[in-house]
Amino acid sequence: MKKIALIISMSFLLLIIISTVGKAQNLPSPSFGVKGGANFSNLYTADAENNKAIAGFNVGLFSKFPISSDLAFQPEIYFTTKGSKVTYDNTFVNGSAGFNLNYIEVPVLLVVNIFGNFDIGVGPYAACLVSGKVKNSSNIDLFNFEDNINTGDFNRFDAGFAAGVSLDFKSVSVGARYSYGLTKVGKVKTYLGTTYTFPDANNAVLSFYASIPLHKN
């Protein structure tokens, strides 16, 4: 929670600074629009080879605040799907569990124009879990994931960093972005005197998107 609060505070502070600089330089007013695309998400753990990415989507809104001719501040808000298919195999049981997590996410990016219409964006994000489901398939019906694990078993908030590239054209932009969470997806729990986190993993998402400005100077 302290990491999330720090990221949000830094983002708002950056927005205030950029707005002040923009007024001083008499820059154009911000642009805004809609964006959406495909996600390929995973849950990153120390045993990452047992995890498989799953496909999903993202859709939402963005705005862009010019700082200079080569810099812009770009906050966004969108609905995004995350998760993974995790396989397990030990002495007692083997199978797979599919984690499907849905978030409202707010990234705050600093966008740098490298040359022409090619941009690089990097910055923090904060997200709130809307819903979470698990589907399990194993050789032994030892634990019913579907009935015993729900939204309340996952951390409500996620925060991390995102970086990506984009190509800006007159009426549309296309891009790719990678985001990595700094908070664990699962909550810390205690069972029979043993403390554990399930899933003990971080969100990782590769997304491809297109954005359409509804207002542009």
Image (cartoon, rainbow, N blue to C red):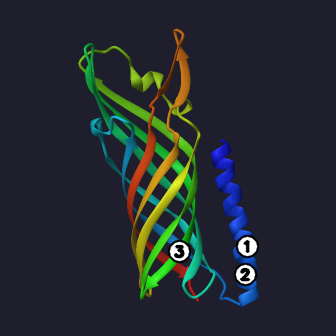
Q: Rate crowding at label 2 as few (under 14), some (14 to 19) or many (20 or more) other CA atoms within 10 Å.
A: some
Give the residue at mark 1.
17
Please determine whether, in this image, residue 6 is positioned above or below residue 43.
below
Helix, strand or loop at mark 1: helix
Left or right relative to 51: residue 32: right
Whether the residues at callouts 2 and 1 have beta carbons within 8 Å, the answer is yes
Give the residue at mark 2.
21
Look at label 3 and name its amino acid: Val
What distance separates the C-alpha of mark 2 from that of mark 1? 6 Å
- Residue 15 x %, y %: 69, 69
Q: Rate crowding at label 1 as few (under 14), some (14 to 19) or many (20 or more) other CA atoms within 10 Å.
A: few
Give the residue at mark 3.
111
What distance separates the C-alpha of mark 1 from that of mark 3? 15 Å
- Residue 214 x %, y %: 54, 79
Helix, strand or loop at mark 3: strand
Q: Earlier in the sequence, mark 3 or mark 2?
A: 2
How many numbered discs?
A: 3
Helix, strand or loop at mark 2: helix
